[in-house]
Image (spheres, grey):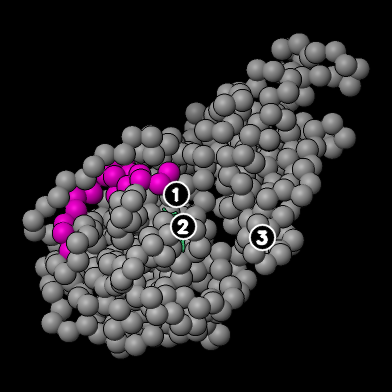
Amino acid sequence: MNLREFIAQARDRGWLVTIEDEINPNLEMARILSAHDGVPIMFTRVRGSPYPVVAGVCSDRAYFALALDVPPDRLLFTLTEALAHPVTPPLVADAPCQEVIEPDVDLTALPILRHLPDDAGPYVTAGVCVIKDPDYGRNVAFHRLLRLDERRFAVRLVEGRGTDTAWRKAQADLEVAICLGAPIQVLVAAATSPPKGVDELSIAHALAPTPLVKCRTKDLEVPAEAEFVLEGRITHQVTAEGPFIDLTETWDIVRQQPIIEIDCITHRRQPIYQALLPGKLEHKLLMGLPREPTIYAAVNQVCDCRNVCLTAGGMFWLHAVVQIAKRHPDDGRRAIEAAFRGHTSLKHVVVVDEDVDIFDPAAVEWAIATRFQASRDLVVLENQPSSSLDPSATHVPGQKARTSKLGLDATIPWIAPDGHLRSEEERAAFRRVTYERCPALRKCRAPRTGGEVWNAKR
Ligand SMILES: Cc1cc2nc3c(=O)[nH]c(=O)nc-3n(C[C@H](O)[C@H](O)[C@H](O)COP(=O)(O)O)c2cc1C
Protein backbone atom coordinates (compact mmCIF):
# COMPACT_ATOMS: atom_id res chain seq x y z
CA MET A 1 0.00 0.00 0.00
CA ASN A 2 1.46 3.36 -0.97
CA LEU A 3 1.66 6.27 1.46
CA ARG A 4 -1.40 8.09 0.06
CA GLU A 5 -3.57 5.00 0.21
CA PHE A 6 -2.44 4.47 3.80
CA ILE A 7 -3.25 8.07 4.75
CA ALA A 8 -6.72 7.77 3.18
CA GLN A 9 -7.42 4.48 4.98
CA ALA A 10 -6.12 5.84 8.30
CA ARG A 11 -8.34 8.91 7.88
CA ASP A 12 -11.40 6.73 7.11
CA ARG A 13 -10.79 4.73 10.28
CA GLY A 14 -10.47 7.87 12.39
CA TRP A 15 -6.82 7.08 13.22
CA LEU A 16 -5.24 10.10 11.52
CA VAL A 17 -4.62 13.31 13.44
CA THR A 18 -4.54 16.30 11.09
CA ILE A 19 -2.90 19.52 12.23
CA GLU A 20 -3.84 22.51 10.13
CA ASP A 21 -1.99 25.23 12.08
CA GLU A 22 1.35 26.24 10.63
CA ILE A 23 4.04 24.15 12.35
CA ASN A 24 7.79 24.70 12.33
CA PRO A 25 9.90 21.66 11.31
CA ASN A 26 12.67 23.14 13.42
CA LEU A 27 12.02 21.38 16.80
CA GLU A 28 8.28 22.19 17.06
CA MET A 29 7.11 19.32 14.83
CA ALA A 30 9.19 16.71 16.69
CA ARG A 31 7.75 17.89 20.01
CA ILE A 32 4.22 17.41 18.70
CA LEU A 33 5.10 13.99 17.31
CA SER A 34 6.66 12.88 20.56
CA ALA A 35 3.47 13.85 22.42
CA HIS A 36 1.45 11.68 19.97
CA ASP A 37 3.73 8.65 19.70
CA GLY A 38 1.86 5.74 18.14
CA VAL A 39 -0.52 7.88 16.05
CA PRO A 40 -0.30 8.83 12.35
CA ILE A 41 -0.17 12.64 12.04
CA MET A 42 -0.49 14.90 9.03
CA PHE A 43 0.81 18.48 9.12
CA THR A 44 -0.84 20.34 6.28
CA ARG A 45 0.94 23.71 6.71
CA VAL A 46 4.68 23.63 7.29
CA ARG A 47 6.74 26.73 7.94
CA GLY A 48 9.32 27.33 5.20
CA SER A 49 8.16 24.52 2.90
CA PRO A 50 5.34 24.02 0.40
CA TYR A 51 5.10 20.32 1.24
CA PRO A 52 2.86 18.69 3.88
CA VAL A 53 4.46 16.25 6.33
CA VAL A 54 3.15 12.89 7.53
CA ALA A 55 4.63 10.87 10.39
CA GLY A 56 3.77 7.96 12.68
CA VAL A 57 2.83 5.77 9.72
CA CYS A 58 4.71 2.75 11.12
CA SER A 59 4.15 3.39 14.82
CA ASP A 60 1.75 0.50 15.57
CA ARG A 61 1.43 -3.12 14.46
CA ALA A 62 -2.13 -2.30 13.42
CA TYR A 63 -0.84 0.09 10.73
CA PHE A 64 1.46 -2.54 9.18
CA ALA A 65 -1.44 -4.96 9.35
CA LEU A 66 -3.68 -2.52 7.49
CA ALA A 67 -1.05 -1.76 4.86
CA LEU A 68 -0.24 -5.44 4.25
CA ASP A 69 -3.84 -6.61 4.63
CA VAL A 70 -3.16 -9.16 7.37
CA PRO A 71 -4.22 -9.45 11.06
CA PRO A 72 -1.62 -7.90 13.43
CA ASP A 73 -0.75 -11.25 15.04
CA ARG A 74 -0.10 -12.80 11.59
CA LEU A 75 2.49 -10.22 10.45
CA LEU A 76 5.34 -12.54 11.34
CA PHE A 77 4.03 -15.22 8.98
CA THR A 78 3.48 -12.81 6.10
CA LEU A 79 7.00 -11.50 6.49
CA THR A 80 8.43 -15.02 6.80
CA GLU A 81 6.73 -15.98 3.54
CA ALA A 82 8.02 -12.87 1.72
CA LEU A 83 11.57 -13.44 2.99
CA ALA A 84 11.45 -17.06 1.83
CA HIS A 85 9.91 -16.28 -1.56
CA PRO A 86 10.89 -12.84 -2.92
CA VAL A 87 9.23 -11.89 -6.23
CA THR A 88 10.97 -9.74 -8.85
CA PRO A 89 9.00 -6.50 -9.28
CA PRO A 90 7.92 -5.27 -12.72
CA LEU A 91 9.52 -2.22 -14.33
CA VAL A 92 7.18 0.53 -15.57
CA ALA A 93 7.96 3.38 -17.96
CA ASP A 94 5.79 6.08 -16.36
CA ALA A 95 5.78 6.52 -12.65
CA PRO A 96 4.07 8.85 -10.19
CA CYS A 97 7.42 9.53 -8.47
CA GLN A 98 8.62 11.20 -11.69
CA GLU A 99 5.54 13.35 -12.39
CA VAL A 100 7.65 16.42 -11.55
CA ILE A 101 11.37 16.79 -12.22
CA GLU A 102 12.72 19.72 -10.25
CA PRO A 103 14.74 22.12 -12.41
CA ASP A 104 17.13 22.84 -9.51
CA VAL A 105 18.29 20.82 -6.55
CA ASP A 106 17.41 22.62 -3.34
CA LEU A 107 17.28 20.44 -0.25
CA THR A 108 16.32 23.43 1.90
CA ALA A 109 12.87 23.42 0.22
CA LEU A 110 12.15 20.04 1.86
CA PRO A 111 10.58 20.20 5.34
CA ILE A 112 13.43 18.25 6.95
CA LEU A 113 12.93 18.13 10.72
CA ARG A 114 15.42 19.18 13.32
CA HIS A 115 14.39 16.94 16.21
CA LEU A 116 16.35 18.09 19.26
CA PRO A 117 18.35 21.24 20.07
CA ASP A 118 21.61 19.22 20.37
CA ASP A 119 21.20 17.44 17.01
CA ALA A 120 23.91 18.21 14.45
CA GLY A 121 21.21 19.72 12.18
CA PRO A 122 18.07 18.78 10.25
CA TYR A 123 17.85 15.02 9.57
CA VAL A 124 15.99 12.95 6.98
CA THR A 125 14.88 9.89 9.00
CA ALA A 126 12.54 7.94 6.69
CA GLY A 127 14.88 7.89 3.68
CA VAL A 128 15.20 4.51 1.99
CA CYS A 129 18.49 4.34 0.09
CA VAL A 130 18.83 2.20 -3.02
CA ILE A 131 22.33 1.31 -4.27
CA LYS A 132 23.90 -1.41 -6.43
CA ASP A 133 26.72 -3.59 -5.19
CA PRO A 134 28.88 -4.88 -8.10
CA ASP A 135 28.93 -8.38 -6.57
CA TYR A 136 25.58 -8.71 -4.83
CA GLY A 137 23.27 -6.44 -6.79
CA ARG A 138 20.70 -4.07 -5.37
CA ASN A 139 20.69 -3.16 -1.67
CA VAL A 140 17.95 -1.17 -0.02
CA ALA A 141 18.24 0.20 3.53
CA PHE A 142 17.35 3.08 5.78
CA HIS A 143 20.11 5.61 6.37
CA ARG A 144 19.69 8.77 8.38
CA LEU A 145 20.82 11.84 6.47
CA LEU A 146 22.11 15.08 7.96
CA ARG A 147 21.40 17.99 5.60
CA LEU A 148 24.62 19.95 5.13
CA ASP A 149 23.45 22.53 2.53
CA GLU A 150 21.27 22.87 -0.62
CA ARG A 151 22.83 19.85 -2.35
CA ARG A 152 24.58 17.69 0.25
CA PHE A 153 23.92 15.27 3.09
CA ALA A 154 26.16 13.39 5.52
CA VAL A 155 24.98 9.77 5.63
CA ARG A 156 25.28 7.31 8.51
CA LEU A 157 26.49 3.96 7.12
CA VAL A 158 26.68 1.27 9.79
CA GLU A 159 29.94 -0.59 9.21
CA GLY A 160 29.75 -3.95 7.44
CA ARG A 161 26.15 -3.56 6.28
CA GLY A 162 25.09 -3.61 2.60
CA THR A 163 25.51 0.05 1.68
CA ASP A 164 28.76 0.42 3.62
CA THR A 165 30.40 -2.60 1.96
CA ALA A 166 29.40 -1.43 -1.53
CA TRP A 167 30.68 2.09 -0.80
CA ARG A 168 34.03 0.80 0.48
CA LYS A 169 34.45 -1.33 -2.66
CA ALA A 170 33.60 1.51 -5.07
CA GLN A 171 36.62 3.27 -6.58
CA ALA A 172 34.51 6.24 -7.70
CA ASP A 173 31.34 7.75 -6.23
CA LEU A 174 28.59 5.19 -5.55
CA GLU A 175 25.25 6.02 -7.17
CA VAL A 176 22.36 6.27 -4.73
CA ALA A 177 18.62 6.96 -4.97
CA ILE A 178 16.94 8.14 -1.76
CA CYS A 179 13.21 7.40 -1.66
CA LEU A 180 11.06 9.53 0.65
CA GLY A 181 7.47 8.54 1.33
CA ALA A 182 7.97 5.00 0.03
CA PRO A 183 5.10 2.45 0.09
CA ILE A 184 4.76 0.74 3.50
CA GLN A 185 5.93 -2.65 2.19
CA VAL A 186 9.14 -0.98 1.00
CA LEU A 187 9.70 0.51 4.46
CA VAL A 188 9.31 -2.96 5.99
CA ALA A 189 11.57 -4.61 3.39
CA ALA A 190 14.25 -1.92 3.78
CA ALA A 191 14.47 -2.76 7.47
CA THR A 192 15.20 -6.46 6.81
CA SER A 193 18.72 -7.89 6.54
CA PRO A 194 18.32 -10.78 4.10
CA PRO A 195 21.37 -12.79 3.01
CA LYS A 196 23.69 -10.97 0.59
CA GLY A 197 22.34 -11.02 -2.96
CA VAL A 198 18.67 -11.07 -1.90
CA ASP A 199 16.90 -7.97 -3.21
CA GLU A 200 14.81 -6.10 -0.63
CA LEU A 201 12.55 -4.66 -3.35
CA SER A 202 11.66 -8.24 -4.34
CA ILE A 203 10.75 -8.86 -0.69
CA ALA A 204 8.61 -5.71 -0.84
CA HIS A 205 6.91 -6.93 -4.02
CA ALA A 206 6.19 -10.29 -2.36
CA LEU A 207 4.44 -8.34 0.43
CA ALA A 208 2.39 -6.07 -1.87
CA PRO A 209 2.61 -4.92 -5.51
CA THR A 210 5.67 -2.67 -5.86
CA PRO A 211 6.31 -1.57 -9.45
CA LEU A 212 9.69 0.03 -10.09
CA VAL A 213 10.89 2.76 -12.44
CA LYS A 214 14.37 3.62 -13.71
CA CYS A 215 15.92 6.73 -12.19
CA ARG A 216 16.32 9.74 -14.48
CA THR A 217 20.06 10.26 -13.98
CA LYS A 218 21.31 7.05 -12.30
CA ASP A 219 21.45 3.37 -13.21
CA LEU A 220 19.07 2.44 -10.39
CA GLU A 221 15.42 1.41 -10.08
CA VAL A 222 13.16 2.80 -7.39
CA PRO A 223 9.56 2.19 -6.20
CA ALA A 224 7.36 3.98 -8.75
CA GLU A 225 4.93 5.14 -6.05
CA ALA A 226 7.43 6.89 -3.75
CA GLU A 227 6.60 10.53 -3.00
CA PHE A 228 10.11 11.92 -3.65
CA VAL A 229 13.27 10.43 -5.16
CA LEU A 230 16.61 12.17 -4.59
CA GLU A 231 19.16 10.89 -7.12
CA GLY A 232 22.78 11.34 -6.15
CA ARG A 233 26.19 9.89 -5.34
CA ILE A 234 27.84 8.70 -2.11
CA THR A 235 31.24 10.36 -2.45
CA HIS A 236 34.49 9.41 -0.70
CA GLN A 237 34.61 12.72 1.10
CA VAL A 238 33.75 12.42 4.78
CA THR A 239 32.53 14.86 7.41
CA ALA A 240 31.30 14.89 11.01
CA GLU A 241 27.90 13.17 11.40
CA GLY A 242 26.02 13.36 14.72
CA PRO A 243 25.22 13.64 17.52
CA PHE A 244 21.83 12.12 16.92
CA ILE A 245 19.33 10.23 19.09
CA ASP A 246 19.49 6.45 18.77
CA LEU A 247 16.97 3.63 19.08
CA THR A 248 17.68 3.50 22.82
CA GLU A 249 16.64 7.16 23.21
CA THR A 250 20.25 7.90 24.18
CA TRP A 251 22.80 9.92 22.16
CA ASP A 252 24.71 8.30 19.33
CA ILE A 253 28.27 9.66 18.98
CA VAL A 254 29.81 11.93 16.32
CA ARG A 255 31.65 10.01 13.55
CA GLN A 256 33.34 10.82 10.25
CA GLN A 257 30.82 9.68 7.63
CA PRO A 258 30.48 9.94 3.83
CA ILE A 259 28.95 12.94 2.05
CA ILE A 260 26.15 12.41 -0.49
CA GLU A 261 25.78 14.90 -3.35
CA ILE A 262 22.30 15.14 -4.87
CA ASP A 263 22.10 15.68 -8.66
CA CYS A 264 18.36 15.45 -9.37
CA ILE A 265 15.06 15.53 -7.46
CA THR A 266 11.87 13.99 -8.84
CA HIS A 267 8.51 13.78 -7.08
CA ARG A 268 4.80 13.20 -7.38
CA ARG A 269 2.46 16.11 -7.95
CA GLN A 270 1.72 17.70 -4.56
CA PRO A 271 4.14 15.36 -2.80
CA ILE A 272 3.98 14.45 0.87
CA TYR A 273 7.17 14.41 2.92
CA GLN A 274 7.45 11.50 5.37
CA ALA A 275 9.09 11.99 8.76
CA LEU A 276 9.85 9.30 11.32
CA LEU A 277 10.52 10.29 14.92
CA PRO A 278 13.91 8.77 15.85
CA GLY A 279 14.04 6.75 19.06
CA LYS A 280 10.25 6.46 19.22
CA LEU A 281 7.78 3.71 18.38
CA GLU A 282 8.03 3.60 14.60
CA HIS A 283 11.81 3.59 14.60
CA LYS A 284 11.77 0.70 17.07
CA LEU A 285 8.97 -1.26 15.42
CA LEU A 286 10.57 -1.03 11.99
CA MET A 287 13.84 -2.28 13.43
CA GLY A 288 12.21 -5.09 15.40
CA LEU A 289 9.53 -6.54 13.11
CA PRO A 290 12.01 -8.14 10.68
CA ARG A 291 13.72 -9.96 13.60
CA GLU A 292 10.58 -11.80 14.67
CA PRO A 293 10.77 -14.18 11.65
CA THR A 294 14.45 -14.95 12.36
CA ILE A 295 13.68 -15.83 15.99
CA TYR A 296 10.67 -17.87 14.86
CA ALA A 297 12.79 -19.84 12.37
CA ALA A 298 15.49 -20.59 14.97
CA VAL A 299 13.01 -21.71 17.65
CA ASN A 300 11.17 -23.87 15.12
CA GLN A 301 14.35 -25.85 14.62
CA VAL A 302 14.20 -27.14 18.20
CA CYS A 303 10.46 -27.23 18.98
CA ASP A 304 7.05 -26.15 17.69
CA CYS A 305 7.12 -22.32 17.68
CA ARG A 306 3.70 -20.67 17.31
CA ASN A 307 4.51 -16.94 17.38
CA VAL A 308 7.07 -14.34 18.43
CA CYS A 309 6.64 -10.80 19.71
CA LEU A 310 9.43 -8.30 20.31
CA THR A 311 8.09 -6.00 23.01
CA ALA A 312 7.86 -2.21 23.27
CA GLY A 313 9.66 -1.97 26.61
CA GLY A 314 12.67 -3.77 25.14
CA MET A 315 12.64 -1.28 22.25
CA PHE A 316 11.37 -4.06 19.92
CA TRP A 317 15.01 -5.17 19.89
CA LEU A 318 16.28 -6.55 23.20
CA HIS A 319 13.22 -8.34 24.65
CA ALA A 320 11.06 -11.05 23.10
CA VAL A 321 8.16 -13.27 24.05
CA VAL A 322 8.14 -16.64 22.30
CA GLN A 323 5.04 -18.81 22.15
CA ILE A 324 5.46 -22.57 21.74
CA ALA A 325 3.30 -25.68 21.57
CA LYS A 326 5.11 -27.62 24.27
CA ARG A 327 5.57 -31.31 23.52
CA HIS A 328 8.53 -32.14 25.77
CA PRO A 329 9.45 -31.06 29.32
CA ASP A 330 12.62 -29.30 28.05
CA ASP A 331 11.02 -27.39 25.15
CA GLY A 332 10.91 -24.08 27.06
CA ARG A 333 14.64 -24.14 27.81
CA ARG A 334 15.48 -25.21 24.23
CA ALA A 335 13.34 -22.38 22.88
CA ILE A 336 15.25 -19.85 25.05
CA GLU A 337 18.61 -20.91 23.68
CA ALA A 338 17.34 -20.99 20.09
CA ALA A 339 15.75 -17.52 20.38
CA PHE A 340 19.16 -16.06 21.25
CA ARG A 341 20.61 -17.72 18.14
CA GLY A 342 17.77 -16.31 16.01
CA HIS A 343 18.49 -12.69 16.99
CA THR A 344 21.95 -12.19 18.45
CA SER A 345 21.06 -8.76 19.90
CA LEU A 346 18.29 -10.34 22.00
CA LYS A 347 19.02 -9.98 25.71
CA HIS A 348 15.94 -11.19 27.62
CA VAL A 349 13.33 -13.70 26.47
CA VAL A 350 10.19 -15.18 28.01
CA VAL A 351 8.78 -18.43 26.63
CA VAL A 352 5.06 -19.12 27.10
CA ASP A 353 2.48 -21.72 26.07
CA GLU A 354 -0.11 -21.42 23.33
CA ASP A 355 -2.85 -20.23 25.71
CA VAL A 356 -0.99 -16.99 26.56
CA ASP A 357 -1.53 -13.83 24.46
CA ILE A 358 2.03 -12.76 23.70
CA PHE A 359 0.87 -9.30 22.57
CA ASP A 360 -0.59 -8.59 26.05
CA PRO A 361 2.17 -7.75 28.60
CA ALA A 362 -0.20 -8.46 31.50
CA ALA A 363 -0.94 -11.94 30.16
CA VAL A 364 2.78 -12.68 29.83
CA GLU A 365 3.39 -11.46 33.38
CA TRP A 366 0.52 -13.69 34.54
CA ALA A 367 2.28 -16.69 32.98
CA ILE A 368 5.49 -15.76 34.82
CA ALA A 369 3.55 -15.34 38.05
CA THR A 370 1.75 -18.68 37.85
CA ARG A 371 4.11 -21.01 35.95
CA PHE A 372 7.70 -19.87 36.56
CA GLN A 373 10.08 -20.83 39.40
CA ALA A 374 13.40 -18.99 39.34
CA SER A 375 15.39 -21.87 40.83
CA ARG A 376 14.12 -24.20 38.10
CA ASP A 377 13.12 -22.17 35.03
CA LEU A 378 15.68 -19.38 34.81
CA VAL A 379 18.43 -19.53 32.18
CA VAL A 380 21.39 -17.14 32.58
CA LEU A 381 24.10 -17.02 29.91
CA GLU A 382 27.19 -15.00 30.76
CA ASN A 383 29.63 -13.15 28.48
CA GLN A 384 27.52 -13.34 25.33
CA PRO A 385 27.69 -11.21 22.15
CA SER A 386 25.58 -8.10 22.74
CA SER A 387 23.70 -5.44 20.89
CA SER A 388 25.86 -2.36 20.42
CA LEU A 389 22.76 -0.40 21.48
CA ASP A 390 22.69 -1.61 25.10
CA PRO A 391 24.43 1.01 27.28
CA SER A 392 24.75 -1.52 30.14
CA ALA A 393 26.79 -4.00 28.05
CA THR A 394 30.62 -4.13 28.12
CA HIS A 395 31.89 -2.02 25.23
CA VAL A 396 35.53 -2.28 24.11
CA PRO A 397 36.43 -0.23 20.99
CA GLY A 398 36.93 -2.46 17.92
CA GLN A 399 35.30 -5.49 19.56
CA LYS A 400 31.75 -6.85 19.63
CA ALA A 401 30.01 -5.71 22.84
CA ARG A 402 29.41 -8.41 25.50
CA THR A 403 26.45 -8.95 27.80
CA SER A 404 24.70 -11.44 30.06
CA LYS A 405 21.46 -12.92 28.75
CA LEU A 406 18.44 -14.13 30.64
CA GLY A 407 15.61 -16.43 29.65
CA LEU A 408 12.45 -17.25 31.60
CA ASP A 409 10.69 -20.51 30.85
CA ALA A 410 7.15 -19.50 31.80
CA THR A 411 5.51 -22.53 30.21
CA ILE A 412 3.47 -24.94 32.32
CA PRO A 413 6.02 -27.05 34.23
CA TRP A 414 5.68 -30.67 33.15
CA ILE A 415 7.88 -31.98 35.95
CA ALA A 416 6.33 -31.65 39.42
CA PRO A 417 8.46 -30.72 42.48
CA ASP A 418 8.57 -34.41 43.50
CA GLY A 419 10.05 -35.29 40.07
CA HIS A 420 7.02 -37.01 38.50
CA LEU A 421 5.81 -36.13 34.99
CA ARG A 422 2.53 -34.25 35.35
CA SER A 423 -0.47 -35.80 33.61
CA GLU A 424 -2.48 -33.80 31.07
CA GLU A 425 -5.14 -33.26 33.70
CA GLU A 426 -2.58 -31.92 36.18
CA ARG A 427 -1.19 -29.57 33.52
CA ALA A 428 -4.69 -28.33 32.71
CA ALA A 429 -4.96 -27.03 36.28
CA PHE A 430 -2.48 -24.27 35.28
CA ARG A 431 -4.87 -22.85 32.69
CA ARG A 432 -6.68 -19.58 33.26
CA VAL A 433 -10.37 -19.91 34.08
CA THR A 434 -12.43 -17.56 31.92
CA TYR A 435 -15.96 -16.20 32.07
CA GLU A 436 -18.37 -16.84 29.23
CA ARG A 437 -19.44 -13.95 27.03
CA CYS A 438 -22.75 -12.36 27.89
CA PRO A 439 -25.33 -12.64 25.06
CA ALA A 440 -26.71 -9.19 25.96
CA LEU A 441 -23.53 -7.60 24.65
CA ARG A 442 -23.20 -6.50 21.05
CA LYS A 443 -20.17 -6.25 18.77
CA CYS A 444 -18.73 -2.90 17.73
CA ARG A 445 -15.46 -1.70 16.20
CA ALA A 446 -12.56 -0.76 18.46
CA PRO A 447 -11.76 2.89 17.68
CA ARG A 448 -8.06 2.61 16.87
CA THR A 449 -7.07 -0.95 16.11
CA GLY A 450 -10.13 -1.79 14.03
CA GLY A 451 -10.44 -5.00 16.08
CA GLU A 452 -13.68 -6.09 17.66
CA VAL A 453 -14.66 -5.25 21.22
CA TRP A 454 -17.89 -5.90 23.10
CA ASN A 455 -20.08 -3.06 24.31
CA ALA A 456 -23.24 -3.09 26.37
CA LYS A 457 -26.47 -2.68 24.39
CA ARG A 458 -28.37 0.51 25.33
C1 LIG B 1 14.17 3.68 11.03
C2 LIG B 1 15.48 3.04 10.73
C3 LIG B 1 16.62 3.81 10.65
C4 LIG B 1 17.84 3.26 10.35
N1 LIG B 1 18.95 4.04 10.22
C5 LIG B 1 20.11 3.51 9.80
C6 LIG B 1 21.25 4.33 9.55
O1 LIG B 1 21.21 5.54 9.74
N2 LIG B 1 22.36 3.73 9.09
C7 LIG B 1 22.44 2.39 8.85
O2 LIG B 1 23.48 1.92 8.38
N3 LIG B 1 21.39 1.58 9.10
C8 LIG B 1 20.24 2.12 9.56
N4 LIG B 1 19.15 1.32 9.79
C9 LIG B 1 19.27 -0.09 9.63
C10 LIG B 1 19.20 -0.50 8.20
O3 LIG B 1 18.03 -0.22 7.51
C11 LIG B 1 19.39 -1.97 8.33
O4 LIG B 1 20.72 -2.06 8.67
C12 LIG B 1 19.22 -2.79 7.16
O5 LIG B 1 18.32 -3.72 7.60
C13 LIG B 1 20.51 -3.48 6.82
O6 LIG B 1 20.35 -4.05 5.63
P1 LIG B 1 21.62 -4.35 4.73
O7 LIG B 1 22.64 -5.10 5.58
O8 LIG B 1 21.03 -5.17 3.65
O9 LIG B 1 22.14 -3.04 4.27
C14 LIG B 1 17.93 1.86 10.14
C15 LIG B 1 16.78 1.08 10.23
C16 LIG B 1 15.57 1.66 10.53
C17 LIG B 1 14.38 0.79 10.61
For marks 1 and 2 on the same chain, the one whose residue lies earlier in the sequence: 2
Contact? badges 1 and 2 (CB < 8 Å):
yes
Residue at the far right: name it: 418
What is the C-alpha distance between the residues marked 3 and 1? 21 Å
Q: In which quarter of the image is residue 356?
A: top right
Q: In which quarter of the image is residue 371?
A: top right
Magenta stretch: give its range: 194-215
- The residue that mark 3 highlights is 399
Dividing the image into four quarters, tell me where ligand 1 lies: bottom left
**Left or right: 39 as drawn, with respect to 87:** right
Residue type of the residue flagged with mark 1:
Ser
Contact? badges 2 and 3 (CB < 8 Å):
no
Residue type of the residue flagged with mark 2:
Arg
Q: Is residue 88 visible?
A: yes
Crowdedness of circle 2 by 10 Å Cα count: few (<14), some, many (20+)?
A: few
Q: Which of marks 3 and 1 is in front?
A: 3
Q: Is residue 67 visible?
A: no
Percent position of residue 12, x then y: 29, 55
Residue type of the residue flagged with mark 3:
Gln
Percent position of residue 385, x then y: 68, 50
Residue at the far left: name it: 93
Q: Give the quarter of the figure containing the C terminus.
A: top left
Q: In this view, does 442 lie above or below 415?
A: below
**Left or right: 228 as drawn, with respect to 117:** left
Q: Is residue 458 above or below residue 261?
A: above
Percent position of residue 303, x then y: 61, 24
Q: Does the residue labelled 2 lie within 8 Å of ligand 1?
A: yes
Mark number displayed over residue 193: 1
What is the C-alpha distance between the residues marked 1 and 2? 9 Å
Residue shown at 51% from the left, 71% from the top: 34
Q: What secondary structure is found at the residue carrying circle 3?
A: loop
**Left or right: 66 as drawn, with respect to 121:** left
